[in-house]
Image (cartoon, rainbow, N blue to C red):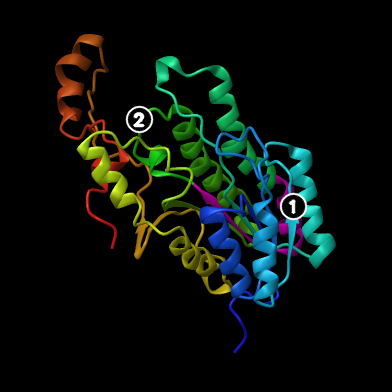
Amino acid sequence: MGKLLEGKVALVTGGGRGVGRGIALALAQAGAKVVVNDLGASLDGMTHTEQPAAQVVAEIEAMGGQAIVNGGSVASRQDADEMVEAAVKAFGRLDIVVNNAGILRDAIFHRMTEQEFDDVVAVHLKGCFNVSRAAAPLFKEQGSGSYVHMTSTSGLIGNFGQANYSAAKLGIVALSKSIAVDMQKFNVRSNAIAPFAWTRMVGSIPDETPEQKKRVEGLKKLVPERVAPFVVGLCADAAADVSGQIFGVRNNEIFLFSQPRPIRTAHRGEGWTPESVLDTALPMLRADFYKLDRSGDVFTWDPV
């Protein structure tokens, strides 16, 4: 029996470390040829410290697979075009795009600078657009393709000090859904995954109070490689009907997230005034208001 992704070609952004590295290795193990993209930048995206993508390519080749390094920035549309071109030049096609690259610039909102906001949106949200858009004509022409975009519970639920990251990550969900809707007729699918994993991206979470220490200890149990099997399955031909969904992967748990739909309605035949909104509408709706939850308030149990 052939491997699940035999004959497929995948591009993984941010594939040099953490979740991206695990995905790149798993895709190769399943038979895909892989373009491993990574800037080799530090967590804030500022300095180029090493070339982790080359190490991942060496690991893939050591297991008998095929892979190439790409050092482009997802924030650059030209670099994104060149990533797709590199895949086609090296392997003749492209079937899978995993948008995983990311940086952090955490700051409490009233202190967040415009630059900190712009930089995070440029890599996460614009980066997803750039790479996805670069691959779109190819996917359309061949009548197939799978996009997997990394979102986060910071966007889906909420988190402290991450307005830039949260906004970008929730934007990715809408982008993924729009791609799924627009490209459905070409048999192209697009899904988002919120990965739970202890990586550099969450290694900066404060652990000063007993509660914070307990949470960090729980997070350290989250193995980044556990996200990869779900990605491989999602990209297989047998999952060709799965599109426009939001998933979460947390060690051995897989979640399907809800998507916004109306949950309660207030109706007034004669229309609304500001006073009747205060007296009637808001009291009617208040029972279903959401708390100001953060991710840790919702996922309260230890990883399985």
Counting the numbered discs, the total is 2
- Judged left or right of residue 238, residue 246 is left
Residue at image x 70%, y 75%? 7
Q: Are marks 2 and 1 in contact (CB under 8 Å)?
A: no
The C terminus lies in which quarter of the figure?
bottom left
Give the residue number, with chain letter if any, for mark 1. 70
Residue at image x 63%, y 36%? 126
Q: Secondary structure at mark 2?
A: loop
Give the residue number, with chain letter if any, for mark 2. 160
Residue at image x 61%, y 81%? 3
- Judged left or right of residue 191, residue 41 is right
- The answer to whether residue 141 is magenta is yes
Q: Position of residue 182 (x, y in %)?
A: 61, 48
Number of other residues with Cα within 10 Å of mark 1, as a class: few under 14, some 14 to 19, many 20 or more? many
- Judged left or right of residue 278, residue 81 is right
* Among the 4 quarters of the image, the one containing residue 40: top right
- Judged left or right of residue 41, residue 137 is right
Q: Is residue 75 above or below residue 258?
A: above
Q: Residue furthest right?
A: 89
Q: Earlier in the sequence, mark 2 or mark 1?
A: 1
Q: Amino acid at mark 2?
A: Phe
Q: Amino acid at mark 1?
A: Asn
Q: Which residues are magenta?
A: 133-150
- The answer to whether residue 274 is magenta is no
Q: Position of residue 19 (x, y in %)?
A: 51, 55
Alpha carbons under labels 2 and 1: distance apart: 33 Å
Q: Position of residue 227 (x, y in %)?
A: 46, 61
* Among the 4 quarters of the image, the one containing residue 162: top left
Q: Is residue 187 above or below residue 197?
A: below
